[in-house]
Amino acid sequence: MFPNPRTGASLILSFRLASRGILIIGSGPLAASRAFAALEADASHVYILAKGGLRSACEEIQWRVRERQLEFIDWDQLVDLDAWLTGRTDIALACITDTLLGSPLRSRASTEELYILLQKHRIPVNTTDTPDLCNYSFTSSHRFLDPTTGEPTPLQVGVTTNGEGCRLASRITREVVARLPKDVGCAVQSVGRMRRLAKSKTMDDTDADEVSAEDSGVLTPNRPVEEPTLHRLKWVAQVSEYWPLSKLATLSEEEMLELTVDKPLNPPTIHSLSPTPKPGRIVLLGSGPGHPALLTLLTHQILTTHADLVLADKLVPQGVLDLIPSKAELVIAKKFPGNADKSQEEMMDLAVQGARKGLCVVRLKQGDPSIYARSSEEVLFFRARGFEPLLVPGISSALAGPTFGGIPLTHRGVAESVVVCTGVGRGGRGVQMPEYERGRTLVILMGVARLQRVVDALLGVSSPTHYPPYLPIAIIERASLPDQRVTSGTLSTIVQALEAGGPQRPPGMIVVGWSVLGLWGDGAAGAGVLDDGEGDEGARRERDEQRVKEWLGGEGWRVREGLDEAWAGLDKGWLERGVS
């Protein structure tokens, strides 16, 4: 019993336009896209037929005409399209693009006339957004590139919805492509190379495409194919069917010859080749602000399932380190003042050594690895040694820390923008701070240990930054952890406040700006901050000082210990379920 045909499908074909041309009617971006596809398909001529002259065409078409890739025909100067088509026997396809919805350049009646004329000359037609005036349709396609060289591979995929949803076809294509390995096109190249090697004993390259045992099992070349060639082609067919795509993509010339030349008539297995050492890899992970429940799902999975060697920064909290299984080796950076660069080099060298042994090496950093965590220099270091690391983002402490401290980074009427900077001067130079803006929240990382210098820079002692001494500031230490501490005050009192609190609790961060008081109590202290930014400077300062006095209750600063009750009340089992 054979299946009954169900109509409504497309006969999806793929072909090159070698020595044939295409006629594209319209000169907008869609016409340019069709022209580019035709050029990549080796079209001998691409004719652009449109009204308004070349100046009315989109920029891409104008450029391709100047580069002599296209031939532009001004419809306004064309006397007889019927006669012109009669003299153009090289046109294999036509597409009408000036019917695109949103660009009503051609009426239905005009489109039908054009369609009938092209049909008269036996030229297949595609009419945009008009399925009933189409003999063929374009698929939403993607051409795979070699991820190493950037050169096109033979592999293309296409999706059609038969006119029911072009945008949806594009989305489906993207999702299909995203689920395929990036080097899948290289696998196709390897198989093509093996096919040619398998046939080379009995036929030259001219006849290579006439045999495709792996495609149909039917051999119909112009001359008989010798028995060994048939077996070699069957080997290639089995390798194509069963071997991992990643293995096919990385086959060496020697391995291809092992598979296809002078082998016994038994199909090889993946184990018949010399074993290739398992390639190691390096992953840069961000551990978030500190609380284990704030790890991303991907970070948690890599850390607990895939890691063989974990190289952790010294301030990654114990709760995160406890998640690392005992089978994985843990090394914690020996960073201390004066040894930071040497320790950084040691960790990078250890990562490369581990990856060369085939290990999955995890560089575990605080927060997000791309924010003041030296991940960029590590990426370049590893890349120069043959490893392309995977950079996995984490929840940045610059964003999460203020939230745990009860401080909104933006707040309507109080703070409109955020700037993140470091409190460490580059190369031993003085700390540089951005100028004061009333509606900006400033987040300073790695500045608590040198707080006096940071405050001096903000107050303009070392540079004209113009931060007012009564401006709210908060220091958040050990954000998201049970011993979190938030010290709030003003630029004029915060140094004394931190000293009065006893030993510091790294890691810490500094938040500067009116957002520090934005969520205090009923929010009245921060109400109208930006509205008060206008008018007389003396009056504004008086209102601001009164605002701060009400916020601090007449004291110089305020200290809050521990997490908010809502976080403190979450039992450990619930948190573990949240990250499992």
Image: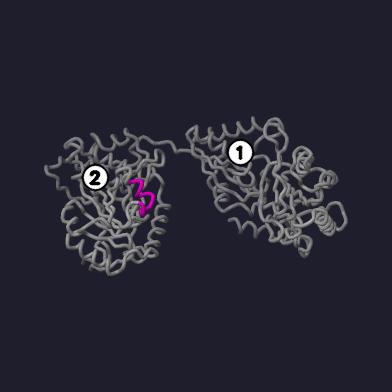
Residue type (three-letter) at the residue carrying disc 2:
Lys
In what element is the residue under mark 2?
helix
Between 121 and 20, which is closer to the camera in this rendering? 121
Q: In the displayed image of the protein, which residue is found farthest to the right?
A: 554
Above or below for 207 versus 533: above
In what element is the residue under mark 1?
loop
Q: Is residue 553 left or right of residue 260?
A: right
Q: Which residue is mark 1?
A: 374
Who comes first in sequence, dot 2 or dot 1?
2
Between 18 and 89, which is closer to the camera in this rendering? 89
**Which quadrant of the structure image shows residue 11?**
bottom left
Tags 2 and 1 touching, CB below 8 Å: no
**Which quadrant of the structure image shows residue 528?**
bottom right
Magenta-tinted stretch:
55-64
Residue 258 located within the stretch drawn in magenta: no
Residue 60 located within the stretch drawn in magenta: yes
Q: Which dot, 2 or 1, sits closer to the camera? A: 1
Q: Quadrant of the N terminus?
A: bottom left
Q: Position of residue 422 (x, y in %)?
A: 68, 41
Q: Is residue 15 left or right of residue 571?
A: left
Q: Position of residue 55 (x, y in %)?
A: 36, 52
**Which quadrant of the structure image shows residue 162?**
bottom left
Q: Position of residue 356 (x, y in %)?
A: 49, 33
10 Å crowding of disc 1: few (<14), some (14-19), many (20+)? few
Q: Which mark is residue 234?
A: 2
Residue type (three-letter) at the residue carrying disc 1:
Arg
10 Å crowding of disc 2: few (<14), some (14-19), many (20+)? many
